[in-house]
């Protein structure tokens, strides 16, 4: 599943799903370290392979006055400190070819945002760094079309690609996950379900994206039952005051119970 190719990734032989989790954006060192410490403790206990996630900057925002970051290099150095302190790999999203080269110096996985996954230059630049490339499925794309995004990575000499489904937009202000796409995309690469972004409610009149966090558990359980290889979720100890995507984040205090349930579901499925 290409997990063993990531430095520092633990528990790869546990036959468990892997987890990409952390805050939406790096707001500062203290918050990143606090979240990482908690998630690492939980995933070590449950033997879940874990990658810490955090955006070093937010380029796709509804309003010009929305939080975009604390500075590129400052945020990337925090991601590296998380990795070195807790011995876990890290992932961040990129938006330009220059971002790919810069971020590759600090993190283990480069993520292509859903709105940009058809940008060939960006995908190729990420692939050529040699890092794992996590391709977010565009809200406007079919599962079958993600084959071509993966091919751009492999044709660039990099076999380390993942696909992350973050829902499809069928209306103006809601996302829907079609679980029929999971087995389709697993033909092309390991598949991750982005539990929290798939519950977003974008394009609100306020210019601030809404969400349905009460359904995070439902969505995660459905994803494990559908056979996803990994889960992606944004979590924060104070979602109401998070500077980005607070409306659809999982409260960090709820993470251990949810992951415990998901591990049990995964074990049951593996035994069938």
Image (cartoon, helix red, strand yellow):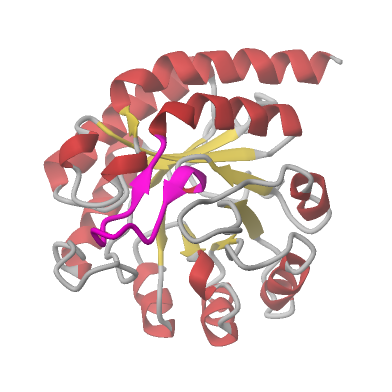
Residue drawn at 59 percent across, 81 percent down: 124
What is the count of numbered marks? 0
Q: Is residue 237 above or below residue 87?
A: above
Q: Position of residue 120 (x, y in %)?
A: 60, 84
Q: Can I make out residue 228 in this image?
A: yes
Outermost residue to the bottom: 121
Q: Can I make out residue 84 in this image?
A: no
Residue drawn at 71 percent across, 15 percent down: 267
Q: Nearer the viewer, residue 243 or 260?
A: 243
Q: Position of residue 84 (x, y in %)?
A: 30, 44
Query: In the figure, residue 88 lies in which quadrant?
Result: top left
Look at the magenta stretch and give its main secondary structure. Answer: loop
Q: Position of residue 224 (x, y in %)?
A: 67, 29
Q: Nearer the viewer, residue 105 or 91?
A: 91
What residue range appears in magenta? Answer: 198-212
**Horizontal placement of 255 versus 192: left or right?**
left
Does 179 appear in magenta? no
Q: Is residue 186 above or below residue 75?
A: above
Outermost residue to the right: 272
Residue drawn at 64 percent across, 56 percent down: 162
**Horizontal placement of 158 versus 18: left or right?**
right
**Horizontal placement of 151 versus 72: left or right?**
right
**Horizontal placement of 216 versus 179: left or right?**
left
């Amino acid at each position: 599943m290409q997990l063993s190719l990531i430095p520092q990734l633990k528990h790869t032989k546990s036959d468990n799903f892997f987890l990409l989790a952390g805050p939406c954006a790096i707001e500062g060192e203290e918050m990143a370290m606090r979240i990482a410490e908690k998630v690492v403790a939980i995933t070590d206990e449950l033997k879940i392979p874990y990658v810490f996630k955090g955006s070093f900057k937010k380029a796709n925002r509804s309003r010009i006055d929305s939080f975009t970051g604390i500075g590129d290099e400052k945020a990337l150095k925090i991601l590296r400190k998380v990795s070195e302190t807790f011995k876990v790999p890290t992932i961040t999203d990129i938006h330009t070819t220059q971002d790919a080269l810069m971020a590759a110096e600090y993190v283990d996985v480069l993520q292509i945002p859903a709105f940009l996954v058809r940008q060939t230059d960006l995908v190729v630049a990420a692939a050529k760094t040699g890092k794992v490339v996590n391709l977010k499925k565009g809200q406007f794309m079919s599962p079958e079309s993600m084959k071509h995004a993966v091919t751009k990575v492999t044709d660039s000499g990099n076999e380390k690609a993942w696909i992350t489904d973050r829902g499809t937009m069928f209306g103006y202000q809601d996302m829907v996950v079609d679980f029929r796409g999971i087995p389709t995309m697993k033909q092309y690469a390991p598949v991750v379900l982005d539990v929290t972004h798939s519950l977003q409610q974008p394009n609100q009149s306020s210019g601030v994206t809404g969400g349905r966090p009460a359904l995070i558990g439902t969505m995660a359980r459905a994803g494990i039952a559908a056979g996803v290889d990994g889960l992606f979720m944004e979590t924060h100890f104070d979602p109401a005051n998070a500077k980005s995507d607070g409306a659809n984040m999982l409260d960090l205090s709820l993470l251990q119970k949810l992951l415990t349930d998901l591990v049990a579901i995964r074990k049951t499925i593996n035994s069938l």
